[in-house]
Amino acid sequence: MTIKKYTMIFILLITNIFMVKAQHPPVFDGMTTDSTKIMLGDLELDLVRYSYQTPGINFLAIHDNEDTGVKAAFDYIAMNGGSILDCQYGGARNFKFTEDEITYQTDPNSIYTDEGLPLGLAKYGASSEPVIAELKNTGKIIMKTYNQNRPGYIFTLHNNADGGFGIQSYLPENELGSTADSVHVNYEMDEDDMILVTELKLFNLLKKEDVNVVLQSQEAVDDGSLSIYAMQNKIPYINVEVQHGHQDENLRLIQMGVKAMAEAHPEKGIKKPAESTAGF
């Protein structure tokens, strides 16, 4: 009886460990995974790629507490093929790690430019040149892993909270107004659901579909984010930003974004969503 009891405890522990490590296990037959591990001090970061019928669109999820976008990406690639690179580091938003008995913290979406990275780290407290170099290398590894097939674009997925941040934030009179060149608002949509792009042709295509969309300003402050990195390096960029839990809308906006990227950049070889799943 005692042996059975401890055997069951051991199985439960192993199961729990697996669930923590494999935060998004394969969810349908034929999906494959591969993983790249990075250590930031005592923080383990796993870059897990989920793929189905590649080649196809390649998504990137940076924050490990924003799962609605990941689930919507699974829905998309189940119907259309493609992949998503998911950054997994314990279900938190920020990187938080200890090195030489000092705790550091930063937003993982602030490590992609030389100017913005130190500012993003200092915002949360401790900073040092070795840690800046370490985070810079982490950003390079994420980009290299994401771009393993050289897609030549960046398509990110983010989620936000109800009422805290959305399309209204980018209007001229509001806090992010200076970061936007142009804004199109569909007042019938939830203001938390939107798309941000860095190219006028992408903006115009999405505006034509009457979706909440922001064109990032060329004068936007360098905060180390991927949208700034993409703009500086002339890489086509789309971020689908949707409220937590709005999975169906997340999928719809992903479909719109993929269609726009395919039309704006036919040279990238991106397939448009299947006709039956386009949703617009």
Image (tube, rainbow, N blue to C red):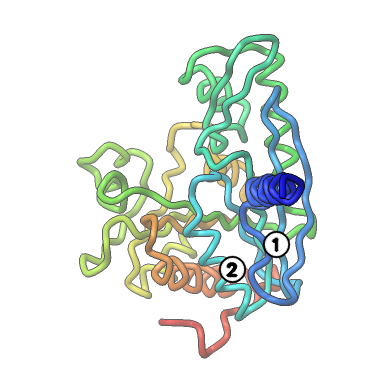
The one of 14 and 141 positioned closer to us in this rendering: 14
Q: Position of residue 246 (x, y in %)?
A: 38, 64
> Is 91 on the left-hand or right-hand side of 170?
right
Residue 143 shows in the view: no
Label 2 close to label 1 by CB (< 8 Å):
yes
Per the image, label 1 sits on a secondary structure element best described as strand
Task: Give residue 201's position: percent from left, percent from top.
Answer: 48, 64
The residue lying toward the viewer, choosing from 166 and 173, is: 166
Q: Image check: 123 left or right of 152?
A: left
Task: Give whichever of discs 2 and 1 has the lower sequence position.
Answer: 1
Residue 96 higher or lower than 185, as above or below: above
- The residue type indicated by label 2 comes to Phe
Q: Position of residue 5 (x, y in %)?
A: 69, 48
Of residues 167 and 99, the one nearer the viewer is 99
Which residue is pictured at 64% across the width and 51% down the height? Answer: 19
Question: Can you say which quadrant of the picture contains the C terminus?
Answer: bottom left
| Neighbours of disc 2 within 10 Å: few (<14), some (14-19), many (20+) | many
- Quadrant housing residue 264: bottom right
Residue 71: which numbered mark, if any? none
Q: Quadrant of residue 205?
A: bottom left
The span from disc 2 to disc 1 (Cα, nearest Å) is: 8 Å
Pointer 1 residue: 50
Question: Residue 195 in the image: x percent, y percent?
Answer: 42, 59
Residue pointed to by mark 2: 74
Q: Residue at x 27, y 57 (%)?
A: 191
Q: Say which amino acid is labelled 1.
A: Tyr
Q: Quadrant of residue 247?
A: bottom left
Q: Residue at x 39, y 55 (%)?
A: 244
